[in-house]
Image (cartoon, helix red, strand yellow):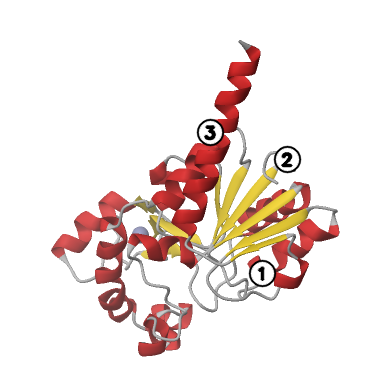
């Protein structure tokens, strides 16, 4: 399907990162089942008490920066290099697609790459935020002293407009939308498959557990993102080598 239906756009969710040891916060046993998102993950909570929210985020950021890309991330980066994947649209904030080598990555829930000062608007890179966290429980803006907010989408915040518009455009242009590790439950990302289907594209889903689009998918695989994508990359790598052989 990937060879026949180009361009292929990939949509990834928490299920891709769990194989790097990053828990799915929305799962029944996940973080948001233990911690009230309104108290730790909402923009209201951050405005009310940013230091308290950082006491919760600090170990998370350490865990995210310590995680490594897994075979799913590596396979998607390879498929992009081989010309089989146009872009990756991701709900994940952990930077693992970029670290694996993917170049066209649309982060619809933001990422930990930068943090912004709500006081003066200055942006700080992750490296600087980590330095500041070594000295304090919460990173204060070096310019004005306000507590920095990570550029990830908090509950109660709008998604970054440019990213979601780009994601919609990619979904409409895709002849194949390959969904990996997402239950497709969180809007507006959950609406992207409808944009692909509505413009005549097809849908393939690799996920552990059902999604609302299973009946409309041309292909539905229940399984590990890393195992499935590594096999896909190996198969297409072979095809590519075969084509090179034919040409020679
Ligand atoms: Zn500032």
Q: Quadrant of residue 60?
A: bottom left
Q: Which residue is mark 2?
A: 6
Labels 3, 2: front one: 3
Front residue of 18 and 105 = 18
Ranked by sequence position, the earlier of labels 1 and 3 is 1
Numbered tag placed on residue 190 in the rendering: 1
Ranked by sequence position, the earlier of labels 1 and 2 is 2
Instruction: Tell me the crowding category of disc 3: few under 14, some 14 to 19, or many 20 or more residues within 10 angstroms, Cα based.
Output: some
Ranked by sequence position, the earlier of labels 3 and 2 is 2
Q: CA distance from mark 1 to mark 3?
A: 30 Å
Residue, x 35% and y 66% (percent of image)? 22
Q: CA distance from mark 3 to mark 2?
A: 16 Å
Instruction: Tell me the crowding category of disc 1: few under 14, some 14 to 19, or many 20 or more residues within 10 angstroms, Cα based.
Output: some
Total numbered labels: 3
Eyeballing the image, is 83 above or below 88? above
Q: Position of residue 11 (x, y in %)?
A: 60, 57
């Amino acid at each position: 399907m990937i060879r026949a239906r180009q361009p292929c756009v990939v949509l990834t969710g928490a299920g891709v990162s769990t194989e790097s040891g990053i828990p799915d916060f929305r799962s029944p046993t996940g973080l948001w089942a233990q911690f009230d998102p309104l108290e730790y993950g909402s923009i209201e909570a951050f405005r009310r008490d940013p230091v308290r929210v950082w006491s919760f985020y600090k170990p998370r950021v350490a865990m995210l920066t310590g995680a490594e890309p897994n075979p799913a991330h590596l396979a998607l980066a390879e498929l992009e290099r081989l010309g089989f994947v146009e872009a990756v649209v991701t709900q994940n904030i952990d930077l693992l697609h970029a670290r694996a080598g993917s170049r066209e990555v649309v982060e619809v829930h933001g990422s930990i790459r930068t943090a912004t000062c709500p006081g003066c608007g200055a942006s700080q890179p992750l490296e600087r935020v980590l330095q500041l966290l070594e000295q304090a429980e919460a990173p204060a803006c070096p310019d004005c002293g306000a507590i920095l907010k990570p550029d990830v989408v908090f509950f109660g915040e709008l998604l970054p407009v440019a990213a979601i518009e780009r994601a919609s455009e990619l979904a409409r242009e895709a002849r194949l939308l390959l969904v990996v590790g997402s239950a497709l439950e969180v809007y507006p990302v959950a609406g992207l498959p409808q944009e692909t289907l509505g413009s005549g594209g097809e849908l393939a889903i690799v996920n552990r557990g059902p999604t609302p689009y299973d009946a409309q998918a041309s292909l539905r695989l229940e399984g590990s993102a890393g195992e499935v994508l590594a096999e896909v990359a190996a198969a297409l790598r072979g095809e590519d080598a075969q084509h090179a052989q034919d040409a020679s």
